[in-house]
Each structure stands twice: as C-alpha cells, then as structure tokens.
Image: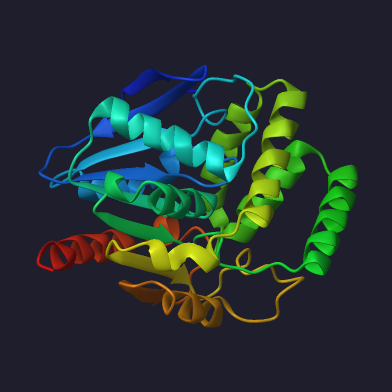
Amino acid sequence: MVSYPYKTHRIALPGNCEIAYVDEGRGEQTILFIHGLANYAMVWQKNIEHLKHNYRCIAIDLPGNGLSGRNEHDFSIKFFAESVYAFIKAMGLKKLCIAGHSMGGQVAMTLLINHPECAEKLVLCAPAGLEEFSSFDKTLFFAGYHLFDMVSSEEGMLRKTIEHSFYHHGTQAESVIKELTDIMKTYKLNYYRKMIDGCIKGMIEEPVLDRVHLIKQPTLILFGMHDALIPNKLLHHYTPEKMARDAVKKFPSATLEMFANCGHFLQWEKAEEVSESIVMFLKRAGTM
C-alpha cells in the first residue's frame, strides 16, 4: 500500500472527480503545489518541509495521478486546470500562490488565464507550455513517442524520464522512481496508458505562450540550466535559458531565476535554494 509521509486527505469534486492532497503548515498565505506528468504530490516534499513553518502548504495529486481517484477523464490541460479551480473553490482558499512544476506549470498558467481571480501569485518550476510546436514538430514528436512506446515498458519509460529529469540523479532519482513505480502498480494498464497519452497530447496541443500576457499576477519562473526535458532536445535546438528568457518577456510581471548544475527536477535537486527563492518572491510580491 502506497502512503505519504503526511496525512492524506481526500475531497470529492463535481464530475466524478476525487482529489487526494496533503495539507501541512500554517500561515497567512497558502501555497498550492501542482505536480507534473505522471508524478505525485510528494515531488514537493522537500519544499513543504522548508516552507510549512511560515506558510500553509497544500500539494495535490491531479485526478488520475498519485492517490487520487481513477475515474475516466480526458486528461487534457484544460480538464486539470478546471479540476484545480474546483478544488480551490471547494476548499475556500484565499491569499493563494499557485506553484506548478513541468506539466503542472502549464496547468497553473491555463488556470490563471481562465480564472484570474483564483490566486494572487504564481511560481513556475521548469514549466511546460512555453514551447511553440509547429505542425511538423507535432508530427515528428508523436511519431517518435509512439516508436519509443512500442519498444519500452511503462516502468522503463518512467525510469528513463525520471533519470533524465535530474542533472545528477544518483539516489535522488532512485527514491522518486521507486515511489512512482509503486504507484504505477496500482493502476490498470490501459488506464495508465490513457492518462499518459492524454497528458502528453495536452502539453503539445494546448500551449499557453500566446496567452501568458493575460497573467497579471506577479510570477516567478525557475529553470535548471541543464534541463534535459524542456525544451524538447530533438525538436528545438536552443537552451532552457534562451527559451525561458524569451518567454518571461511575454509576462506582464515576471522574473526569472536560473539554477546552475541542475536539471528538470529543480525543486528536488535544489530544494533549499528553490524554497528560499519562493520565500523571497512571496515577500517581495507582498509589498508590490
């Protein structure tokens, strides 16, 4: 039985949607953490440990992920964004900062574009959604994805993706891989595949770069200098820093921090530094 180091809560939302979440710490401000593709709430554990002394920290498992319900959904970015919005309303969350990693960042941006009143601040850790994919890019991507899918098991794909998410993976990656593999074993195979396929399709076909000018909230964007997943290395031959610096110019109120010797899982690899950056951002944004 998979369990988290914190008490796990559950809430039933409209549309046959059940979300599992952890709720730690206290403070005037609340940080709502959203994980990435096929991940879980505990990818934020190190940050929660640092931040819970001064902030209420809520980390959710998106529908179909982690310990959340396994009901049938389309798993689009819009679906996840609307699910998070329903969670915020059901929980009555105020003075809220939303923090999203990878696909969770794309979900967070979509949420604030569609429901700008739901949060005051935004933190994006290596967010998806800031790349532009041409029709040719999409054709190449999905052809490569399906080819890899044919020759690799789900566990093999998971291991490879997590290992590539770290600059120095070592034991850090192994602990995440073990926990996510244990969670994977709780799925029916066809459901897990449908969830992964839906998420990947959503990340490619629901970009937000052309709409981030609508995000008026103070925004902190964090990237690892050695991110091997974003941007897509096979399709886009520019660095994470170039992509991030170009993207941040499109936000009305955003700042960018790059972390050396760090990959895609920066909130885990550079947990203390990322947490301190979030603290400084929240204090600074609170005086704006």
User: Is residue 270 depicted above or below 36 in this figure?
Assistant: below
37 or 209, nearer to the observer:
209
Residue 114 falls left or right of residue 148: left
Residue 243 falls left or right of residue 57: right
Quarter of the image with the C terminus in it: bottom left
User: Is residue 60 depicted above or below 185 in this figure?
Assistant: below
User: Is residue 110 depicted above or below 248 in this figure?
Assistant: above
Query: Colour mode?
Result: rainbow
Residue 198 falls left or right of residue 284: right
Q: Residue at x 26, y 61 (%)?
A: 278
161 or 23, nearer to the observer:
23
Can residue 161 be spotted in the picture? yes
Q: How many marks?
A: 0
239 or 205, nearer to the observer:
205
Q: Residue at x 52, y 16 (%)?
A: 16
Can residue 126 be spotted in the picture? no
Position in image of residue 187 (x %, y %): 66, 22
Position in image of residue 231 (x %, y %): 62, 69
204 or 52, nearer to the observer:
204
Q: Residue at x 44, y 75 (%)?
A: 250
Position in image of residue 189 (x %, y %): 75, 25
User: Is residue 190 depicted above or below 88 in this figure?
Assistant: above
